[in-house]
């Protein structure tokens, strides 16, 4: 495995499932903070937090995947990520690991009849017997859709 083809991911859990995000997209990992709700936002948006003067939207990943809102408590974690030119946070249960993965080890996501949550994935990788689903943050956040909804409101 050459260094050029190795990618690093931060893995985290939502329930019994493990997901990964490219480490280069991560700006910060912080403990759960109460959010300020905003009107006319999608149901999976928890609200916003003030992070050192920057207003950061927080997305509940469990709700985004259609599994209901997270009953957040101090053990939950917000992973602050850069998505294009924007900064946003995702609420997850816990951070699990830092993974170094060869590009050759990333498997394509099987085509399923339901494209709802599988559309959020860029690939799958097996690490120490665990399956980790790699997220496409652009699709998870869908800022274009949110901008259109806000403009229509």
Image (cartoon, rainbow, N blue to C red):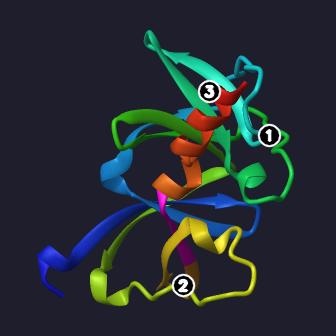
Residue 146: image tag = none
Q: Earlier in the sequence, mark 2 or mark 1?
A: 1
Query: Which of the labelled discs sits on residue 109, or is there none?
Result: 2
Q: What residue sits 71% from the left and 69% below the top? A: 116
The mark closer to the camera, 1 or 3, is 3
Residue displayed at 36% across by 88% down: 105
Q: Position of residue 120 (x, y in %)?
A: 58, 65
Are the residues at dot 3 and dot 2 in contact (C-beta closer than 8 Å)? Answer: no
**Residue under numbered circle 1:** 43
Residue 32 spot, x, y in % from top left: 66, 31
Residue 23, relative to residue 86: is it above or below? below
> For the residue carrying disc 3, how many other residues have a C-alpha within 10 Å: few (<14), some (14-19), or many (20+)?
few
Please check the rendered image and state whether residue 41 is part of the magenta-colored stretch, yes or no. no
Judged left or right of residue 131, residue 99 is: left
**Which callout, 1 or 3, points at the residue further toward the start of the chain?**
1
Q: Is the stretch drawn in magenta largely helix, strand or loop? A: strand
Observer-nearest residue: 43 or 129?
A: 43
Q: How many marks?
A: 3
Residue drawn at the location 85% of the way across and 40% of the way down? 71
Residue corresponding to mark 3: 151
Local SS, label 3 = helix
Residue 111 lies left or right of residue 11; in this view the side is right
Q: Is residue 112 above or below residue 94?
A: below
Give yes or no for contact between labels 1 and 3 (Cβ–Cβ under 8 Å): no
Q: Nearer the viewer, residue 109 or 6?
A: 109
Q: Which residues are magenta?
A: 132-137
């Amino acid at each position: 495995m050459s260094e050029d083809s190795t990618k690093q991911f931060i893995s985290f859990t939502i329930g019994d499932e493990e997901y990964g995000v490219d480490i280069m997209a991560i700006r910060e990992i912080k403990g759960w903070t109460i959010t300020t709700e905003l009107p006319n936002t999608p149901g999976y948006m928890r609200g916003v937090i003030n992070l050192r003067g920057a207003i950061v939207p927080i997305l509940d990943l469990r709700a985004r995947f259609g599994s209901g809102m997270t009953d957040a408590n101090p053990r939950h974690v917000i992973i602050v990520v850069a998505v294009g030119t924007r900064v946003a946070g995702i609420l997850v249960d816990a951070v699990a690991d830092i993974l170094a993965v060869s590009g050759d080890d990333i498997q394509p996501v099987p085509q399923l009849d339901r494209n709802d949550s599988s559309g959020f994935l860029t690939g799958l990788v097996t690490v120490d017997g665990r399956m980790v689903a790699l997220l496409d943050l652009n699709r998870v956040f869908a800022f274009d859709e949110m901008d259109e909804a806000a403009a229509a409101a």
